[in-house]
Amino acid sequence: MIARDLSNSHLVKQIRKKPVAIIPVGSTEQHGPHLPVSTDSDIISFIAKKVSEKTGFLLLPTIEYGVSFEHHPFFNLSITPSTLQKYLIEICASLWKNKIKTIIILNGHHGNQKALNGIPSKVAKIHGIRQKILVYSYWHFMKQRFDHAGFVETSIMRAISGHVKMSAAQKGLVEDGLSREELYRLGKAASKSFISVTKNGVWGDPRRATAKDGRKILTQVIAAIAKESQTCLTG
Ligand SMILES: [Zn+2]
């Protein structure tokens, strides 16, 4: 159920039946030489649409700007964590006024996570409302290790997008042989300066990514998010 396609009366009826909305949040940032800057936004929009179809929850427009300063000097259009929070807090309050009691914020970009996790408590504090806000980052619902423009993101994009240039795909930082401590250290450094850790903006190796793998990962993630959100609502 895509909110922006519905008329006022249709929306009112839908909200009365199921007062739950999904807000996808992505980013606009470099994803190596082979993927578009819209990658995170494309992936989370696709997942959110499928979850909405499975659950009947209302799908709201994707927020395509996120916190991506770590990708400088590569291309990124970024907003600060507090701007992202403020924007979403106001949307939540507005949804409440429209009788939407539950919101699922679906996140597609690692750098947004901290800001998004702070939203439920801030909405309660600032607006004094008891809205149920669930925040999910989609990679927590897959078995694979997540990456950036590596095997996982590239496979998913091959499954859903016509804008992947596999001939330009390059191996980036690979995790094989690195200790947990080393990975943690590199992850922290990458969250400040991605280029200093990966050199080419790629975390992982995208060269063997296939659409088939992408579809497999998506099926798993979409089913798990739909199940988790429904359990959270009834439980
Ligand atoms: Zn990404």
Image (cartoon, rainbow, N blue to C red):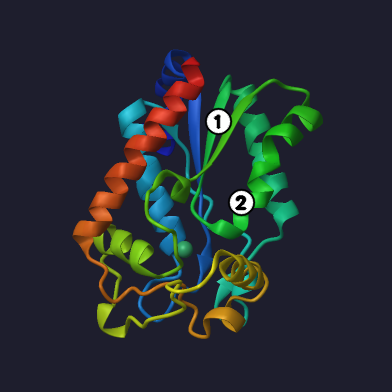
> Which mark is drawn over residue 186?
none
- The reply, left or right, for residue 90 in relation to residue 62 is right
Q: Amino acid at mark 1?
A: Ile
Q: Position of residue 5 (x, y in %)?
A: 38, 37
Mark closer to the chain start, 1 or 2: 1
Q: Is residue 231 among what the camera can see?
A: yes
Residue at left offset 47%, top offset 39%: 60
SS for dot 2? helix
Where on the picture, by quarter, is residue 117?
top right
Q: Amino acid at mark 2?
A: Gln
Label 2 packing within 10 angstroms: few (<14), some (14-19), many (20+): some
Q: Nearer the viewer, residue 30 or 203?
A: 203
- Is residue 178 placed above or below 158 in the rendered structure? below
- The reply, left or right, for residue 187 in relation to residue 229 is right
Q: Which residue, given by chain and number where applicable, does mark 1 sit on?
A: 103
Task: Give the residue furthest to the left.
Answer: 212
- Marker count (numbered): 2
State which quarter of the image contains the N terminus: top left
Q: Nearer the viewer, residue 143 or 232?
A: 143
Q: Nearer the viewer, residue 191 or 175?
A: 175
Q: Is residue 6 among what the camera can see?
A: no
Q: Which residue, given by chain and number where applicable, does mark 2 sit on?
A: 113
Q: Position of residue 220 (x, y in %)?
A: 31, 43
Q: Position of residue 189 (x, y in %)?
A: 65, 73
Q: CA gap, disc 1 to disc 2?
A: 16 Å
In this view, the mark in front (1 or 2): 2
Where on the picture, by quarter, is residue 163?
bottom left
SS for dot 1? strand
